[in-house]
Amino acid sequence: MKKIILLFALSLPVFIADAKEPPVYTKAEILGDVDPSSNKGFDKIKSKYTTKSGIYLRDEVYDAFKDMWKDAKKDGVNLVIISAMRNRNYQAGIWNRKWKNYGGDVSDRAERILQYSSMPGTSRHHWGTDFDLNSLENSYFESGEGKKIYEWLSANAHKYGFFQPYTLFDDYRDAGYREEKWHWSYYPTASKFQRAYNHIVKYDDIKGFDGSEYAPTLDVINNYVNGIETPPYFSEQ
C-alpha cells in the first residue's frame, strides 16, 4: 500500500498518512457546516495565543501549535493567531462583502476575490487545521520583526507538522491563491481533510453565496482547494 510519509531528523516526530485511506470526516465537517464551540473535537484558543476571542482549532492542531509557540518564544519570536477555524457562514460573510465592494465586471469578480479569499465551502479554515499568524500582509514578513517571525517559521514549523500551503507561484504551483506568508496548516490532519474533500464534495455543494455559479467555471476544487505547495518534508514511498 502506498504511503505518504513526512520524515524529519530522528529526534523529530514522524507523521504517516495513508494516501488511500477512506474519508473519516463528514461532509458537514469538510464544508465548514459545524459549530466548533459545541464540537468535542475543537479547543477554544486561550488569550495568550491570540488577539481574537471565541476562536477555535482542532485539538491536535492546538496542541502542536502550543508546542511551537513555546519554542518560538524561547528564540524571541512571538506567534499570534489572528484567525483560526472559520465556518461556512462566517466565510460567506467575508465573501459576500467583497462581492458587493469589488467593482468591475461580475464575470471576473470571483477570480479577483479568489486571489486571497476562499469561496464558502472551499476554505481550509473550515477544517480547524489552519490559522493565520500576526499579519495579513506579506510585506509585514519581509522586514523587521515580521521577517524574523517568517524566517523562524520557515526553518522550524515543519518540526511541529505545520507548513505554508500558499507559496509563490512556480512550475509546481501555478494556480490558486496568491502567496500568503501568514497562513500555516497542520499537515497530518489537513492532508486527510483534503483527500476526504476530493472524495465527497461536488460542485453542487458549493452554493448559497454571491457568484457561486462561477465555482465550476473557475474549477475551484482543482485550482484552489488542491492548489497548494506540498512541502519538501513530505515524500511518497
Image (cartoon, rainbow, N blue to C red):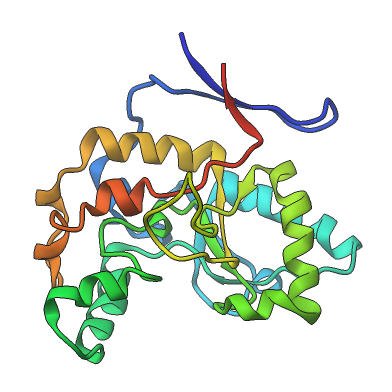
Looking at the image, residue 100 lies above or below residue 73? below
Is residue 105 left or right of 52 when viewed as pictured? left
- Residue at 38% from the left image edge and 19% from the top image edge: 20
In front here: 174 or 158?
A: 174
Q: Is residue 67 visible?
A: no
Number of disc labels: 0
In front here: 57 or 192?
A: 192
Name the outermost residue toward the front: 171
- Residue at 60% from the left image edge and 42% from the top image edge: 231
Name the outermost residue toward the top: 1
Looking at the image, residue 155 lies above or below residue 190? below
Position of residue 100 measured from the top left corner of the image (x, y, whole percent): 20, 88
Position of residue 106 measured from the top left corner of the image (x, y, whole percent): 13, 80
- Residue at 84% from the left image edge and 55% from the top image edge: 71
Looking at the image, residue 236 lies above or below residue 229? above
Q: Is residue 168 visible?
A: yes
Looking at the image, residue 223 lies above or below residue 214? above
In front here: 99 or 186?
A: 99
- Residue at 77% from the left image edge and 62% from the top image edge: 151
Position of residue 110 measured from the top left corner of the image (x, y, whole percent): 22, 72
